[in-house]
Amino acid sequence: MIVAESASSFARTDNSGVDAETVALDDILVVGKRASLVSAQEIKRDKMEIVDSVVADDINKLPDINVTDALSRITGVQILRDRGEGAGVAIRGLTQMETLLNGREVFTAGSGRTLDFADIPSEMLGGIDVYKTSSANHIEGGVGGTIDLRTHRPFDFDGRQLLGSARVIHGDLVDKEEPQFSTLLSDRWKTESVGEFGALVNFAYQRRAWREDQKSAGNPIARSNIIPGQSVIVPNGTSETTSLGHRERSAGSLVLQWRPSDALELYAEGNYAELKTLQDSYQINVTPSSSFVAGSPRLFPGTNDLQSISWTNAPISILSFARDTVDRTQQAAVGGSWNNGALTLKTDLSYTKSFNSLFFSGPVFSGRAAQFNQDLSGQVPTTSVSGTDLLNPANFQYASMAYRTRPFNGELSTARLDGDYQLSSGFIKSVSAGFRYAKRRAGNAPGLIFADAAVTGISAADRPSYIMANPADNFLGGEGGSIGSYSVGNLDSARGAAGLRNAFGITAPIPSAGSPLGIWGISEETQAGYLMSKFEATGFPLDGNIGLRAVQTSESVTGSQSAPSTGAVLPINIDSTDIDYLPSLNLRYQLMKGLYLRGGISKSITRQNFDQLSPSLTLIRNTVTPSLNQGGAGNPQLKPIRSDNFDLAVEKYFNPTTSVYITGFLKQVDGFVSNVSNAEVHDGFTYQVSRPQNDTTATINGFEVGYQQFYDFLPSWLSGFGTQANYTYIDSETPSSILGQKVPLQNLSKHSYNLIGMYEKGPFSARVAYNWRDTFLSGVTNIVGVGALPIYTNSYGWLDASVGYRINEHFSFTIEGMNLLNTLRSSYYGVETRPQSVWVNDTQVGATMTVRL
């Protein structure tokens, strides 16, 4: 793990006259946790925009497996969790953001536009900057904000650096240990004739075993045969899923820098990241039958929601499947900067390529439960099966073999030129201008290959080598009653899908491509230019920047549509062009020494996801009832999501590690997408065709409060204690409601906070980090007999901790723990008497040895 060696190692400041009056942080040399706080505080203070940062030691000293976990510590950032790790990211409630690597656009191939932060090992990074306001010189694309990942460069260090770390990590539910390691070698050389050179190689590898248990109640349905004369809302059974797997990350970077003179610097760099996930899942589903034990139904008091019941002769299905994914992203760049004192020119050329794939395969078999008991009254619903031996293969028949694959591909070429001219006097201190050209391609050829095949006349007992008992026990860590052990498919053969299908008499070959109606390709060109000036009032502590960015986006979208009258598949190609003008203004006023008032006004855009732009049209003709003719398609005419942004902040810097701030914000967002059905005529027939349309607006407002301090004024060993704390309030309003409920934006918690306790004194260090978020809307589902229901995820907290000891200047040792509270997450349909799911993940414990030579 890489420890920050100086407070200014990674700070990239926007210096102005105002800075001369601020607290002098740059001259203080600190190490460890203090270094990270000082560096992050410098960035926040010196940047003209409102920005929050995590700097190297914060990432490498925390037990954070990936970048998303580190981002969860920042005010205004909320994350989801998947397989025990941080997953999706939202800034101030919006997932529409711009993701950068060293200031360049970077992405994971898929239907979306951004990077999956789970792909990146945290050891690769020098820091992360989260921009919540924008300037004209920022790459457009994030109505929520911009996240810039910064890797290490050789000129970041004073001289040679050779570091290595090795970690072993254990998951308690999966009961396995796996290795992780990283290494960095960096050096720089000065010559008399050709200047200074620098080279850096960085590599990280992570392998983590994990387990996730999930219990879900089926979608609520209305039934009239439970209690006479009453419509009762009944969960459509239950499912219990245990997933066991490995996540394997590998990443590397190579950076070369050359400074032939004080005026000129050139660089070349390459970055690579890959995430492989191998997952084995075992799922039992039990659904209600038409009969139940007399007298067993009970309702939650004062509702028509079922609380408990015992069904008889209930259908069972057991799905065992292998689910493997690969994300692979590569980026290469060359560029340089030239400065003659007043004029600075910078250029950067880059190429990014990304690939993403999914593989899904496994058997499904079915049976019957003599009695299936449900009790939904606890935090974890209690379920059980009686009268049927679930470990007897003779009680099950094979129903089908599932098989699906899905690829995504993407690439991006960019060229950028920026110039900045410093003026010697006057209100305007500098004028900047620049141009950026980008060409991006995205596609999903050969499409989703869906090759599920039916199996008949074969019982599980007929193929004993393909059957085993569920390999996982202690479901949900013993929380609530569960169905227990049951027969599952042996997945050793699932990844050899062709052989597995042959063993069950499936002769149809696996297709080499999916339906052309589901295949799309998009080519997108953007040309952006900007003009920006930095200003500073004379004799008045006010500075800022003002600018305008203009961007033209040209898209060419290809796909297919069906012709119902002939069955033919017809190609479609649609071109479109948009022009956006994005003004921005950032102000900073020094109220007194170390106390700032900031304001920001800007307009921003995010282009729509690629799958929503797909023109592919599927038409289903009903020859019996023509009024039921249906169709579905994307919409290449979708406009970008546009936002008007207003920010106001007060920041106080007391000393190098102590600050407090409050930031208020307002976003007025237009262009969110919803699916709308309209009548369209194709081949002389009328269809109700559902397409995404820009018809939803939202207002997002709130505030963020943050505080950090080391208590240096305390005596002796007590002066090693420190605290970081922040709180975020976000409110959103949308014009829609679901069954009379006014709902917020999806995956947005109104309240969230972080509380971090730190200690650093001599060779000892420790950190305890608690992250909490409020209940949030996590989805919407349509229920027969009930209507559309919102799905809410309950509030939950997540606790991580680490303890470290620096043995000497070369060796240090750290013990880390993740999910120490063994957090149980849960969700429900609209009201808590209609539970949906509960999840439990591993508690992970790791030990790391770090070597610096």
Image: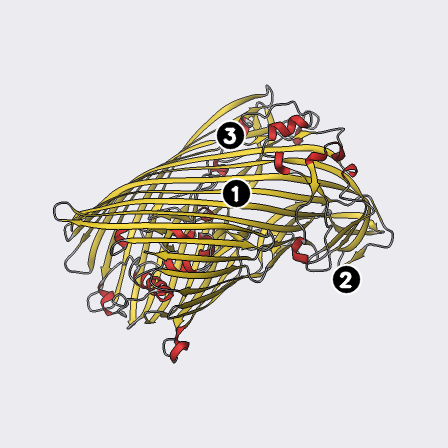
Residue 132 visible in rendering: no
Return the x and y of residue 656 as percentages of the image width and height: 32, 69
Q: Secondary structure at mark 3?
A: loop
- Chain-order first, disc 3 or disc 1: 1
Residue for point 51% across, 46% down? 247
- Identified by mark 2, the residue type is Pro
- Identified by mark 3, the residue type is Ile
Looking at the image, how many numbered discs can be counted on the residues?
3
- Chain-order first, disc 1 or disc 2: 1
User: Image quadrant for the N terminus?
Assistant: bottom left
Return the x and y of residue 112 as percentages of the image width and height: 47, 42
> How would you rate the neighbour count of disc 3 (Cα within 10 Å): few for under 14, some for 14-19, many for 20 or more?
many
Cα–Cα span, label 1 and label 2: 44 Å
Q: Tell me the number on the disc at residue 164.
A: none
Residue 837 visible in rendering: yes
Which is in the foreground here, disc 2 or disc 3?
Answer: 3
Cα–Cα span, label 3 and label 1: 25 Å
Q: Which residue is mark 1?
A: 277
Please indicate whether residue 258 sits to the left or right of residue 825 in the image: left
Q: Which residue is mark 2?
A: 301
Cα–Cα span, label 2 and label 3: 50 Å
**Residue 332 lies in what quarter of the image?**
top left
Q: Secondary structure at mark 1?
A: strand
Return the x and y of residue 432 as percentages of the image width and height: 23, 50
Q: Are marks 3 and 1 in contact (CB under 8 Å)?
A: no
